[in-house]
Image: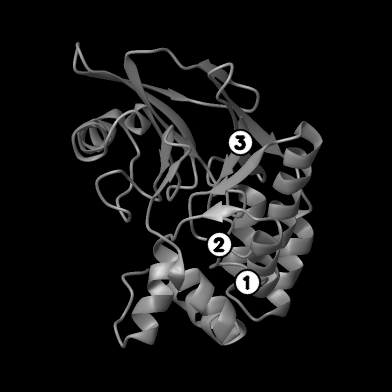
Amino acid sequence: MRFAVFSDIHSNLEGLQAVLSEAERLGMDGLLCCGDVVGYNADPVACVELVREKGIRCIRGNHERGLQDLDEGRTPNMNPLAMEALLFTREALPAEHKEWLLSLPDQLTVEDSFFLFHGSPADPDEYIFDPFEAAYAFKALVHDHPPPANFLCFIGHTHICAAYAFDAQEKRVQNKAVGSGDRFRLKPGAHYMFNVGSCGQYRGGLPVATMTVLDLKEMTLEFRFLSYDYAETQRKVLAAGLPPLLAQRLGLGR
């Protein structure tokens, strides 16, 4: 089977549409999202509806958990920009859409072959930016999550694409910054963790929507960076009265 795996849609309809168009062009068998369907941008309703319409298998991210915090009277652990967007999202979403988001699991096993997490196998809100942090995440993946699926996992949360591999015998983590078209062959005996970036607010220095293509038959993983109409997304952010910085950063990829 071949899967399109992506994350952090963040209410960016144009970015999501770019990823789905590429997945359709490639003839993917399944669509998977590592969380944060909502937040930051202006189209939470349209993005939730499209995710559900396309049958995308999805887990919760910290923005979905933030909605739950608000509903239950807690203050989400978010910076002011994220919090302002979350309050906008709460007001924009119909109750049924919100209930669906909150019903999503915090992790998912796919075909008993690999896992989806939002931040890390150890903690759904944990950020992984370097091999040191990845080493602790691999420890949790190997010891706390059952084989054979703990061979491979996908994460998001940082909005930056990355590739990590763990050699259990040598106790060593290798990492690689990745670009569009980079392809990895998954070898028996290792464990892999891929950050799929973000199709809604990429922070790797480019105004793109990112995704990965997993081929379980060939045991390969490929990154794809896609152009999309981010100027339209920016226009919507400003028209919705959201902070201008949220629009500006889309063009900077930061």
> What residue do we see at 62% from left, 67% from top?
41
* Element type at mark 1: helix
Q: Residues within 10 Å of mark 1 (few under 14, many from 20)?
A: many
> What residue do we see at 55% from left, 86% from top?
95
Residue beneath label 3, please? 3
* Element type at mark 2: loop
Residue beneath label 1, please? 44
Residue beneath label 2, please? 37
Q: Position of residue 207 (x, y in %)?
A: 66, 46
> What residue do we see at 73% from left, 71% from top?
236
* Closer to the camera in the image, 29 or 202: 29
* Closer to the camera in the image, 158 or 98: 98
Marks 1 & 3, CB-CB < 8 Å contact: no
Residue 49 sits above or below residue 222 on the image: below
Q: Position of residue 88 (x, y in %)?
A: 55, 81
Disc 2 to disc 1, how far (Cα)?
8 Å
* Element type at mark 3: strand
Residue 131 sits above or below residue 90 on the image: above
Q: Quadrant of residue 239?
A: bottom right
